[in-house]
Image: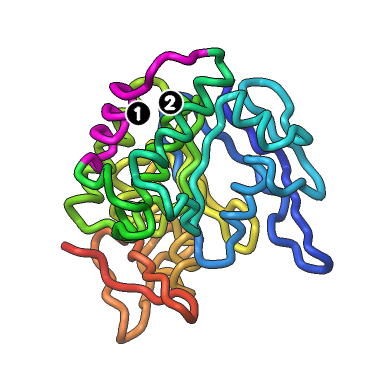
Amino acid sequence: MSLLEVDDVVVQFGGVTAVNHASFEAEAGRITGLIGPNGAGKTTCFNVISGLQRPTKGAVRFNGKSVTRTPVHRRSRMGMARTFQRLEAFGSLTVRENVRVALDIHRGLKGIVKPSGSDLDSLLERVGIAAYADDRADAIPTGTARLLEVARCLAGAPRLLLLDEPSSGLDESETDDFGDLLKDLAAEGMGILMVEHDMDLVMAVCDTIRVLDFGEVIAIGDPSMVRSDPKVQKAYLGYSDLDESGEHVDAGPDVHVDETPTLVTPVVTGGGATVKEPSA
């Protein structure tokens, strides 16, 4: 049984269908990627999973139980935690104070009132932000603030961690360290569902990837399968260098077709998404 099941979910806003009969799963002890072009419906799916958005149709099950109509705070107590694209830290508090608030809330819910200093320091150390412990949250770099939000999620010892663009603002070294952290958490049994535009990170850490386009799941598989899927290439780039049989076709004079097709990394800009060639 999967830890999370999204079953035939539809989300409509007036005449706009943001999610169109999407079904996918996330398992405990594994990292699942949820990727797709801008506007594909990824964050709307996250909102449905976490309880911020009620689906027009379909169901969400967590640990075998329906949570389709369960409020956000109850899902949190059941073991869900999420981050957001928009940073949600308490700017006037320090990094340590932000994490302590989360830790004390979860401990209070469990009836634990003992001092939390050692656990707090361990959380800061684990996500790599101990050096910023006494800095105000509104004064730290964006990448560090994203890690702060991960630390606050981990304070509740979640069973399912939902990460929405967690590597935004991280440099290459920090992204590598973050990938190692995700692998460690999964190895400890935590289920991780991640929306991410950094394809290098997605391909390096995800066990399974689900691809959304116009609200529909168009591909499911491991990184190598998804990377070479013609539908995925078309969704990201507007073309595919493979025909329906999987053979290479002429992609035009401006497109380089290699022996192994690769999914290029989208770069999110203010006006939409552009693409860059993957590193060698």
Pick the quarter of the image with the N terminus: top right
Q: Is residue 17 left or right of residue 124?
A: right
Q: Position of residue 80 (x, y in %)?
A: 56, 31
Camera-nearest residue between 64 and 224: 64
Task: Identify the residue shown where x is 23% and y is 39%.
Answer: 130
Q: Is residue 173 left or right of residue 243?
A: left
Q: For the magenta stretch, what is the residue range? A: 112-130
Task: Identify the residue shown where x is 27% and y is 75%.
Answer: 256
Pick the quarter of the image with the C terminus: bottom left
Sooner in the amino-acid sequence: mark 1 or mark 2: 1
Camera-nearest residue between 174 and 23: 174
The residue singled out by tag 2 in the image is 190
Camera-nearest residue between 258 and 50: 50
User: To which quarter of the image does residue 71 belong?
Assistant: top right
Camera-nearest residue between 231 and 163: 163
Q: Position of residue 137 (x, y in %)?
A: 37, 53
User: To which quarter of the image does residue 243 belong?
Assistant: bottom left
**Circles 1 and 2: CB atoms closer than 8 Å:** yes
* Residue 127 colored in magenta in the image: yes
Q: Position of residue 89 (x, y in %)?
A: 46, 50
Type of the residue with mark 2: Met
Residue 153 sits above or below residue 54 on the image: above
Q: Is residue 248 left or right of residue 72?
A: left
Type of the residue with mark 1: Leu
Task: Identify the residue shown where x is 63% and y is 63%.
Answer: 214
The residue singled out by tag 1 in the image is 185
**SS state under label 2:** loop
**SS state under label 1:** helix
User: To which quarter of the image does residue 16 belong?
Assistant: bottom right
Looking at the image, the residue that sits furthest to the bottom is 253
Q: Residues within 10 Å of mark 2 (few under 14, many from 20)?
A: many
Q: Label the magenta part by its dominant secondary structure.
A: helix
